[in-house]
């Protein structure tokens, strides 16, 4: 270091020599030194060198001057920023000098410096990435200035620098984005040497200095302006891809500008313009979920409505391009149309007439590449799928020949795409789900012939085989009545394909389609051989095949029961028992639905099920996992079965099978859920056989009364009474009320809760009889209040709105009396009742709820805020617009002095963010500071409790912190575009050092963040790695309890998952802390083992997700 500065000071001395040769040699040597990568100047040397070089610009000798100018290039990249400012300032001042030579040499110097800077900055930004962020404030104004210098290469570098900033430093570049957009929009159209016919472009750019004299022999090769346009398009692409929150703004400014540039004459630039527009469309796509649904009460223009209004301009611009010679351009057009239709289905309804010829042109054009044809076909497919059939009827005649030709193409990928299009075309020419006057007859022969040829071929690609089967399935389903003698022979081919392991699943799906056709296709020729083959598939260890086969059999039984023999059906029934089990509820559900269909259309076959099938079904009813769709299927089956009158499967037989174990106490049912399922089945049977009802209900009442009954019998009897009473009016049973109320005093908690459920459920069956009774009991029985309120909750949740309307005021008044109850359990039930009641008459009740926010009781305030949570659901409701207007008032309780009120406010906010983000999106600016405030650990909430000889710390703030972090996690999914991700990360960082539960939550957040906003996470990587490392290297005290060890293990695994996710970010390994941590993991056998298993898990789930697509 010292020797370098010594050497340089030597050279500087020689530069002051009066001998021009000395000066020249010394400057030349300095130039050589500056070009070395290893040179490092201290501040003092820097200052001296800069001063000397600037002085030499005014040297009397021209050669020395020229050398000094050349030195500026390497010098600029070696000195600190303020020195560069000195150089630039001096040069600018010199350019105003009255000496012509100094002006000239300084302008060359300035060009050298400026030419050096942007590539430097772009390169530094690409290499240093996010670390350059803090200097952007100073850099950007410089780069903006350089854009105005008339030098195309320099402009290209400047715009590339912008692109790099946008991608690498999202936070710091934020204030400058609009400046960058404006510069890009200006240079997107910068084409000074070409006159577009329809508009004057940048005129003044023609005045290029003519002193060079090369103007007359100007050729297109000298024109570098295309590089500037390309850089501008790429930079816009970067802006559009990274600034999701500016979408509405982009549709106002960037979208029209890009559309206007589709006519770009330079092919490479045009591809980038298209790509930028594609990025804009892709950004518009993910937010659809809350933009399209009617509850998204976002006022004004949404990005989608703005895009819709620009579709005519897009089509107009693309229409011209679709017949260009350039293959690349046409491919861009198809990609664009495909993405447009995916974002806005139906958008091209008005424009199909102008687009179809363009698509056909590429399909027929001899010069089209294979990829272009594939793109054209897949574009046509997407358009056909997303518009109504009538739109295409005028164009079928033009579309069929080129598509048929593509089905016959020798290249399998073209054939495969064309078969998809053919399948869709068949749906278009004869839509089965709507009346259509279009005559499909002239096209049937061509479509059938080209498809059958592919269907028969054995030596073709697997995908073509599958698509030929699906396409032919669609042809038979939609046009089978016009195929005449071709039909039976084609069905025989299907039978062959069914026997082949590779094609069987696709064939099963095609046969399901055909069997469900409204044309009632004659399948008799293949059923005899086909059904036993289908039955054998139920044994195969391929889940998709089992499910597909059950669907196929179900529709065959429904539509072809007269063609099926008992032997065929027995073959299927033999395979069913293993399919009915709790290990796969979806397969079980399909199997039960099949049995239900069988009971309805082929009841005579049911005598076969009384053995193993029925045992499996009864076993499944007792499984705690039976719920949702499978449970509904089971209830429907019992109802269908009991009315068939099959021997030994009558009402009482089935009732005994279901309830037997509880009464005989031979097998104890371990799960409470089983009792609920059995009771639902009992009620389903009773509804199907109303004559049997009264006797059974009487028996259940006796069972509850009987002092010898076990708790299990009482539990089942009460639940069954509740389920039956929900649908059948039981007010004729005189003793019922007193029997249930007596059960409220049972020593068993489960019996008490069953009694409360039963009372609520029975009330739904006859509100005028039971609801006033329940309300009166709540008032007169303070001891049983909690159970009675649960009954009331059941009534409000299940009864019809019309039935409840007359009682709303009474219920409301009663609930208000209890919303200040000190018992939290009671308050929660009251809150749920208030919320669900509000849904019945929101106009009146929501303002009332809001009024109670001013209550002096913190209990009342917390009840009201919790009530709001129960008014929010994930589907549109009449209350939504009203709620949107006032949810802000309820969320003001985030500033409530009472800790518990603030906690329930967070829970309610979380529910809104999860189920209906549109309610809170616009409030985030005010809510987030309070939310983040609750993530902090509060010393004053931590207290010491003495437990015998031990002291134990209790953190009363933990629950509210947990609630706050849960909200943060939810916001990542629903409102990412409204978050300042860097501020968000600050709090994630704090959470990584918090309590066990919160650590677990923040580790999950890191995994999400790594995929959602990798560049932001990368900027913070070092600060995030440290706490993760601390977690992974923590040792549990040797004498700790087993739970402590398990907890620590779980924490380590979870932290490792976060590390694995962070490592998926490109460049994450470049962080020194991260790579150090990685080597620490690999050197520690325990951590290395955990890490390896996690990576295995993640790679296997990736494979699965690919597989299902």
Image (tube, rainbow, N blue to C red):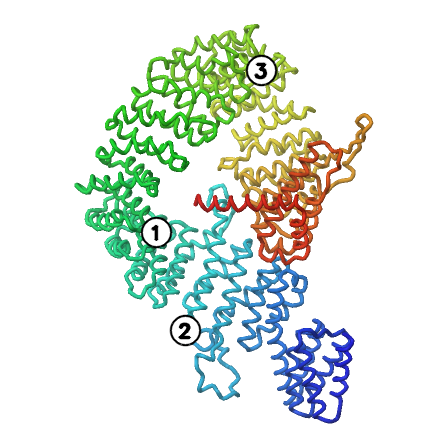
Q: Look at the numbered discs 2 and 1 and tell me whether their residues touch, using CB distance below 8 Å.
A: no
Q: Residue at x 47, y 42 (%)?
A: 294
Q: In this view, does 785 lie to the left or right of 764?
A: right
- In the displayed structure, would residue 973 be above or below residue 653? below
Q: Name the residue under label 3.
A: 751
- CA separation in Å, label 2 and label 1: 35 Å
Question: Foreground mark, 2 or 3?
Answer: 3
Where's residue 283, x and y in %? 50, 54
Q: Which of marks 2 and 3 is nearer the N terminus?
A: 2
Question: Foreground mark, 2 or 1?
Answer: 1
Dot 2 falls on a residue whose secondary structure is loop
Q: Which of marks 2 and 1 is nearer the N terminus?
A: 2
Asked if one can make out residue 128 in the rendered structure from this viewpoint, the answer is yes
Q: Which residue lies furthest to the bottom in this view?
A: 19
- Dividing the picture into quadrants, the one containing residue 1096 is top right
Q: Which part of the image, by quadrant, shows the N terminus? A: bottom right
The disc at residue 196 is 2
Q: Residue furthest right?
A: 949
């Amino acid at each position: 270091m010292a020797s370098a500065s010594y050497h340089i000071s030597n050279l500087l001395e020689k530069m002051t020599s009066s001998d021009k040769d000395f000066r020249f040699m010394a400057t030349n040597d300095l130039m050589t030194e500056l070009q070395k990568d290893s040179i490092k100047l201290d501040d003092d040397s820097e200052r001296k060198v800069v001063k000397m070089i600037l002085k030499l610009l005014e040297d009397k000798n021209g050669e020395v001057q020229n050398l000094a100018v050349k030195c500026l290039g390497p010098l600029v990249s070696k000195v600190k920023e303020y020195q560069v400012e000195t150089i630039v300032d001096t040069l600018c001042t010199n350019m105003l000098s009255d000496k012509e030579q100094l002006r000239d040499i300084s302008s060359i110097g300035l060009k050298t410096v400026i030419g050096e800077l942007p590539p430097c900055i772009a390169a530094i930004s690409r290499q240093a990435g996010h670390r350059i962020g803090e200097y952007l404030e100073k850099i950007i104004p410089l780069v903006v200035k350089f854009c105005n210098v008339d030098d195309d290469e320099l402009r290209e570098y400047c715009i590339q620098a912008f692109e790099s900033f946008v991608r690498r430093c999202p936070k710091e570049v934020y204030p400058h984005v609009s400046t960058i957009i404006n510069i890009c929009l200006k240079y997107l159209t910068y084409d000074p040497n070409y006159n577009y016919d329809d508009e004057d472009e940048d005129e003044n750019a023609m005045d290029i200095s003519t002193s060079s004299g090369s103007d007359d022999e100007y050729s297109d090769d000298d024109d570098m302006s295309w590089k500037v346009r390309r850089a501008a398009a790429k930079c816009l692409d970067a802006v559009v891809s990274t600034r999701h929150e500016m979408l509405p703004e982009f549709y106002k400014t960037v979208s029209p500008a890009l559309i206007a540039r589709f006519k770009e004459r330079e092919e490479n630039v045009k591809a980038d313009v298209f790509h930028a527009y594609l990025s804009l469309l892709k950004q518009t796509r993910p937010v659809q979920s809350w933009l399209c649904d009617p509850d998204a009460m976002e006022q004004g223009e949404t990005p989608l409505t703005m895009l819709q209004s620009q579709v005519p301009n897009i089509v107009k611009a693309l229409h011209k391009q679709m017949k260009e010679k350039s293959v690349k351009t046409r491919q861009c057009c198809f990609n664009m149309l495909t993405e447009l239709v995916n974002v806005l289905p139906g958008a091209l309804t008005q424009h199909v007439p102008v687009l179809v010829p363009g698509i056909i042109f590429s399909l027929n054009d001899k010069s089209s590449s294979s990829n272009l044809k594939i793109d054209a076909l897949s574009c046509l497919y997407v358009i056909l799928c997303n518009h109504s059939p009538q739109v295409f009827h005028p164009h079928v005649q033009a579309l069929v020949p080129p598509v048929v030709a593509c089905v016959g193409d020798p290249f399998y990928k073209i054939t495969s795409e064309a078969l998809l299009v053919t399948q869709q075309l068949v749906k278009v020419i004869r839509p089965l789900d709507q009346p259509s006057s279009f005559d499909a007859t002239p096209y049937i022969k061509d479509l059938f012939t080209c498809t059958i040829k592919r269907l028969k071929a054995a030596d073709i690609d697997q995908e073509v085989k599958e698509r030929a089967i699906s396409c032919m399935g669609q042809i038979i389903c939609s046009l089978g009545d016009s195929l005449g003698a071709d039909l039976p022979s084609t069905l025989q081919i299907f039978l062959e394909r069914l026997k082949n392991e590779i094609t069987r699943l696709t064939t099963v799906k095609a046969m399901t389609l055909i069997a469900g056709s409204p044309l009632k296709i004659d399948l008799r020729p293949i059923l005899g051989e086909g059904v036993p083959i289908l039955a054998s598939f139920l044994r195969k260890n391929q889940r998709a095949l089992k499910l597909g086969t059950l669907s196929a059999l179900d529709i065959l039984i429904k539509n072809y029961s007269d063609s099926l023999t008992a032997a065929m059906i027995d073959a299927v029934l033999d395979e069913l028992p293993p399919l009915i089990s709790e290990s796969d509820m979806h397969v079980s559900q399909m199997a039960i639905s099949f049995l239900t269909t069988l009971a309805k259309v082929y009841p005579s076959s049911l005598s076969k099920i009384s053995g193993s099938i029925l045992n499996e079904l009864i076993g499944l009813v007792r499984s705690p996992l039976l719920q949702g769709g499978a449970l509904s299927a089971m209830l429907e089956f019992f109802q269908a079965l009991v009315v068939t009158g099959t021997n030994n499967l009558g009402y009482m037989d089935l009732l005994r099978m279901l309830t037997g174990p509880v009464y005989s106490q031979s097998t104890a049912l371990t799960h409470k859920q089983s009792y609920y399922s059995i009771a639902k089945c009992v009620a389903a049977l009773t509804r199907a056989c109303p004559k049997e009802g009264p006797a059974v209900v009487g028996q259940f009442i006796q069972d509850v009364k009987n002092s010898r009954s076990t708790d299990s019998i009482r539990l089942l009897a009460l639940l069954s009474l509740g389920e039956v009473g929900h649908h059948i009016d039981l007010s004729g049973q005189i003793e019922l009320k007193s029997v249930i109320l007596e059960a409220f005093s049972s020593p068993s908690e489960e019996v008490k809760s069953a009694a409360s459920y039963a009372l609520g459920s029975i009330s739904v069956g006859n509100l005028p009889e039971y609801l006033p009774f329940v309300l009166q009991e709540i008032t007169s029985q303070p001891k049983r209040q909690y159970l009675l309120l649960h009954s009331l909750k059941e009534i409000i949740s299940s009864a019809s709105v019309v039935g409840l309307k007359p009682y709303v005021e009474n219920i409301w008044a009663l609930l208000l009396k209890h919303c200040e109850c000190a018992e939290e359990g009671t308050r929660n039930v009251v809150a749920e009742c208030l919320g669900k009641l509000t849904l019945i008459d929101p106009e009146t009740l929501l303002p009332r709820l809001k009024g109670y926010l001013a209550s002096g009781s913190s209990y009342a305030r917390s009840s009201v805020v919790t009530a709001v949570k129960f008014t929010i659901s994930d589907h549109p409701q009449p209350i939504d617009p009203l709620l949107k207007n006032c949810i802000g008032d309820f969320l003001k309780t985030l500033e409530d002095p009472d800790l518990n009120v603030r906690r329930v406010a967070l829970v309610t906010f979380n529910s809104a963010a999860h189920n209906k983000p549109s309610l809170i999106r616009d409030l985030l600016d005010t809510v987030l500071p309070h939310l983040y405030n609750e993530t902090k650990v509060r010393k004053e909430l931590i207290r010491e409790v003495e437990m015998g000889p031990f002291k134990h710390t209790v953190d009363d703030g933990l629950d509210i912190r947990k609630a706050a972090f849960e909200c943060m996690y939810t916001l990542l999914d629903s409102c990412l575009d409204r978050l300042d991700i860097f501020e968000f990360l600050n709090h994630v960082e704090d959470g990584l050092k918090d309590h066990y539960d919160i650590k677990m939550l923040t580790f999950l957040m890191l995994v999400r963040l790594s995929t959602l906003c990798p560049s932001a996470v990368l900027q913070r990587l070092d600060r995030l790695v440290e706490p993760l490392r601390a977690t992974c290297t923590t040792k549990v005290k040797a004498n700790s309890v087993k739970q402590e060890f398990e907890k620590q293990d779980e924490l380590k695994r979870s932290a490792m998952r976060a590390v694995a996710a962070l490592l998926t970010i490109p460049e994450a390994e470049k962080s020194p802390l991260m790579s150090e941590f990685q080597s620490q993991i690999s050197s520690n056998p325990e951590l290395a083992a955990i890490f390896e298993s996690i990576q295995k898990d993640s790679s296997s789930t990736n494979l699965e997700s690919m597989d299902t697509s």
